[in-house]
Amino acid sequence: MAISFRIKMFKLFLCFVAALVAVKASGDFVVLHSPNSVMFNGNEEVEQSLLKEVLAAALGFTVKLRGIWSGISITDPFRLPEAVVAVAIEGVDSLDIPKGKRFPLNVNEVEETTWQALRERLEERDNDNTLVRISLGDGLDALGQSALGELKPTPIDETSLRALSLGKEEDKKFLEEVQLLHAIANKAPSAIKPDSKPDIYWLVVSSLRPILDTYGSNSTASREALSLLNNALNVIHDAFIQAYDGQVLIVAFTNDATKVHHIRSVTLDRQKRDAPDTQDDQRGEKKKIEDEEDSNTSNNNTSTNYSDMNNSTANSDTRDDSGISENQDMTNMDIYSNTQNIGQDVTIRSRSKDYTENYPIIFNILLWFGVVFVFSLFAICIAISQMDPGRDSIIYRMTSNRMKKDN
């Protein structure tokens, strides 16, 4: 009996571990370059939803969620990076990049959500920043005149390819994205003019996943594709370091949107499984109220209005083919609307207070007036304490027993 119980518990434990592995989306966050003022250390896992906090902190912005990740430290707040270059590689779990500081990444949102949050964080302070997002999968025709100027990728030399071929659509699209990375690297040193405002360059590579699905992750074509991508990242690395004289943070991370959707679906399934308990309680309370109303109306035996109410109640208790009454549907709608209102209230309460444009002006006036007033009062007190109480001073005249008057 005890052995069978242990076997059942062991099976439950294995199922629990398998569920955790299925839900947890893993990835890589690699720091390719960071200036001496920003240090990355350790190997603690970071969630992708926190990347906006990490990158914003590296640019000198106030972190809204403190104590979230211990992998970053600011050593010199007066020489922070002037820009962040982030390369998002979609559809893969890990990056085979030989250099850089690697951290495990928990992919819990899509890359565009991270980009939007980081862009809004910078726009809160200044609207004159250079904020560029280039999806390389759109191709050169879709990009047109980019924020870096006109991009002119060099033609692909097919003789240098071993396993990839321009005749295949997947290979051609990937090679075009690699050539666009080279074109961006060639344009960056001449097109970028560093200033005191932080910039963000967000590059999205989306055609590596079809290569891995077509040929397999351990195939010669996949290894050649990873080699070409690493070479392009090295070129991007050198170009932006030259453009910003080393004061730039360059990172790369993976993002598999299918796993993000899987996490959401699992979460929704759990919510659906938990929802019937609450709905059953609500339905029970609703049924009790209806029974009390029915008993009251049957005892009164008065007006037609009560009979109409009974008829409507009886009609509402009729069930459809699925066995759920219309009255219960209305209860579910009420529960959903109440939940939605609660969510809206929480969102409104969590917003920060809005300040007018005159707030910093008034704040500085009051601040410096208070500083000058305090130091002036301090100087007057010192001068009075050191004043000589001679016969000609106001102190002698006001403290003498007989007031001295000039005739």
Image: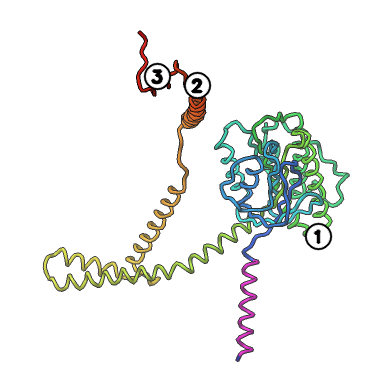
| Magenta residue span | 2-21
Looking at this view, is 364 or 14 the one in front?
Answer: 364
Reply yes or no: does residue 15 show up in magenta: yes
- Return the x and y of residue 186 as percentages of the image width and height: 78, 34
Q: Secondary structure at mark 3?
A: helix
What amino acid is at disc 3? Arg
Question: Which residue is tagged 3?
Answer: 397
Sequence-first disc among 2 and 1: 1
Sequence-first disc among 1 and 3: 1
Left-right relation of 187 to 197: right
Q: Secondary structure at mark 1?
A: loop
Question: Which residue is tagged 1?
Answer: 218
Splitting the image into 4 quarters, where does residue 299 fall? bottom left
Left-right relation of 345 to 242: left
Looking at this view, is 235 or 242 the one in front?
Answer: 242
Reply yes or no: does residue 348 show up in magenta: no
Question: Which residue is tagged 2?
Answer: 388
Does 15 appear above or below 138? below
What amino acid is at disc 1? Asn
Residue at far bottom of view: 1
* Residue drawn where x is 79% and y is 43% of the image: 232
Disc 2/disc 1 C-alpha distance (Å): 94 Å
